[in-house]
Amino acid sequence: MHYFFRRRKFIINKDLQYSLLVISLFYVFLVLIILGSVLFIPAIIQLEHGDYDSHEAVQAANNILYLHSKFWPAVLLALVLIGLHSIRTSHQIAGPLYRFNLLFESIKEGTLPKHLRVRRGDYLNNEVEMINQMLETLRTKVLEIQEAQGGLTVAISECKDVVNHTSKEEMTQRMKDLLEKGDQLGEKLAYFKIAS
């Protein structure tokens, strides 16, 4: 129980978590209506069809009173426990989704974050692993592109420095080097395809 109450904020994504809570409580109410009907209706029918002074009517009334005294506290306890469990479970889904949104926002702003981590006990672990693999691939490819672009920048700078002081053969070699560096950059960029 201590672990349950250790977190300070249980509602992270109100829309998602309240929707899951409402769905959970709807199913609980559905079960309770069916269960209550099965328990109370036969006794009520027996009470209505019998003579009010008969032993069967008194026993049916006692059954209804007994069920009333035991059933509703159990219903209230079940609603509270299922509600709390629903919030905790939805928190274990909403927490990773919140981290996904932070990661997506970071990528949108041009920063490739470190690996995504979730708390022990959170759900969506397979999705976290897939996102981490995507981040690692993306980080590797961006570093390769940055290195290729850096090499091209150096080659352009060297070519610019010697453009007026070099022979035609050396200038041709430097231009070939520039083209080669540009091709390497193009190859690195070709990894990314834009879906249409």
Image (spheres, rainbow, N blue to C red):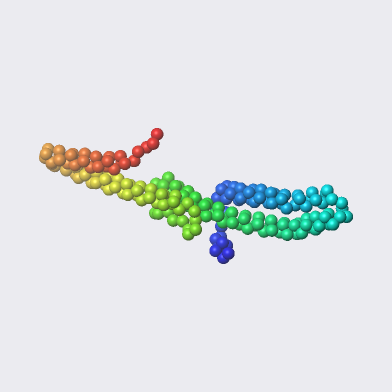
In this view, the residue farthest toward the bottom is 2
How many discs mark residues in the rendered view?
0
Q: Is residue 157 visible?
A: no
In this view, the residue farthest toward the top is 196
Task: Please give the name of the residue rendered at 31% of the width and 41% of the height, measured from the top-left corner.
Answer: 191
Query: Looking at the image, is 23 positioned above or below residue 58?
Result: above
Task: Please give the name of the residue rendered at 52% of the width and 55% of the height, measured from the top-left corner.
Answer: 92
Q: Taking 42 as reference, is 119 left or right?
A: left
Q: Taking 158 as reference, is 136 left or right?
A: right
* Quarter the C terminus occupies: top left
Q: Taking 170 as reference, is 95 left or right?
A: right
Q: Nearer the viewer, residue 124 or 50?
A: 50
Q: Taking 59 as reference, is 12 left or right?
A: left
Residue 25 in percent (x, y) is at: 64, 50
Task: Place residue 73 in its image quadrant.
Answer: bottom right
In this view, the residue farthest toward the front is 55
Residue 134 in percent (x, y) is at: 38, 48
Task: Please give the name of the residue rendered at 55% of the width and 63% of the height, measured from the top-left corner.
Answer: 3
Task: Please give the name of the residue rendered at 24% of the width and 46% of the height, measured from the top-left corner.
Answer: 151
Residue 41 in percent (x, y) is at: 76, 49
